[in-house]
Amino acid sequence: MSHEPEPIVIDVDTGIDDALALLYACAAPAAEILGVSTVVGNVDLNAATRNTRAVLALAGRGDIPVWPGAASPLSSASADARHVHGESGLGHAVLPEPPEPASRTHAVDAIVAAAHAHAGRLILVATGPLTNVALAVMREPELPSLVKRFVIMGGAYAESGNVTPSAEFNIWHDPEAARIVFRAFGGVGGASMVAVGLDVTRKMTFDEKDVAAFAASAAGKPKGAALTRFIEDASRFYFERMEASQGRRHLVMHDPLAVAVALDPTLVETRRAAVDVETSGRLTTGATIADWRGQWGRLANTEVAVSVDAERARKMFFEAMLRLAEGRSR
Ligand code: RIB
Ligand code: CA
């Protein structure tokens, strides 16, 4: 793994776990965050953009450009996930209005420009629906051969979905976009996609005991109080929702794991497969279908994460939060 910080663009639909993923990236020595693009998903575009700016300011990284992208999916009407992330998208957390405005550059222009400027070196991570990435590959078909690594939080490959029995939210929210992206990557000379799906993210969770332990370790640190308050208030909403729906107070670290894998691929084991997306199934729209046995006779386009060192990933997350509490973002 290189020790020079790697240029990274993160595409988010900032909700609670996207916010935690952004905090993680801000504290990761391996990441040179070129910018964060926003997309409709958990919440509407304006909320996702505002939340992203506020979270970056909390991390002391208000200097990172935030590029607004698609306000609606390519697919027909879809639903948000405010029932999981709260009306604002950040649960019970309240962050001040960030001083820095969003950039006037559109996400798609920014992603394509970053890929050209850092050809062969850019790491692209998507932790929301793939609308912006689909528009980017339509704008620049060479995108898959320009990026070094493309990691998504998305899909369910041998696991049940979280929106329907077969579909994970990020794919379900814009299945047409997801299908375009899966079909664009993995060709000859192009990077494969690394799919961090529910199969592995469900193994990386934290609970109130973990939050209390972090609070104790961050006490007295320069940014400890603000960071602890945010993590407590954002995660408490999620705990309440999970308890109501699944009887267990925990937070599934979907998006932080995707960012962690993008910066340290050794956290997961992957298996190559041709993956495609169902876009018109009466019961299965948004399902990610992995052709494990090569029955389609297509080139494999995806490295599907099939196992994860969840303990190490969780430890890395809270160590990163402590660095932020100490005021040590990159
Ligand atoms: O299914 C989980 C994914 O959907 C996460 O990215 C979460 O933020 C939501 O966007
Ligand atoms: Ca997300």
Image (spheres, rainbow, N blue to C red):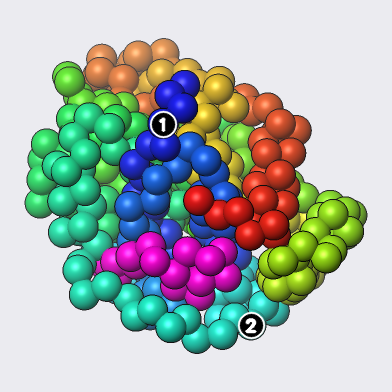
Any part of residue 238 in sight: no
Q: What residue do we see at 27% from left, 57% from top?
A: 132
The residue that mark 2 highlights is: 94
Q: Amino acid at mark 2?
A: Val
**Local secondary structure at mark 2:** loop
User: Of residues 11 and 55, which is closer to you in this image?
Assistant: 55
**Mark number for residue 143?**
none
Residue 67 falls within the magenta-colored stretch: yes
Residue 20 on image: x %, y %: 60, 57
Q: Is residue 5 left or right of residue 120?
A: right
The image shows residue 119 at horizontal and vertical percentages of 18, 35
Q: Position of residue 160 (x, y in %)?
A: 60, 42
Q: Which residue is mark 1?
A: 4
Q: Report x, y in % for residue 90.
A: 60, 73
The vertical placement of 256 against 266, above or below, is: below
| Residue interval drawn in magenta | 52-70
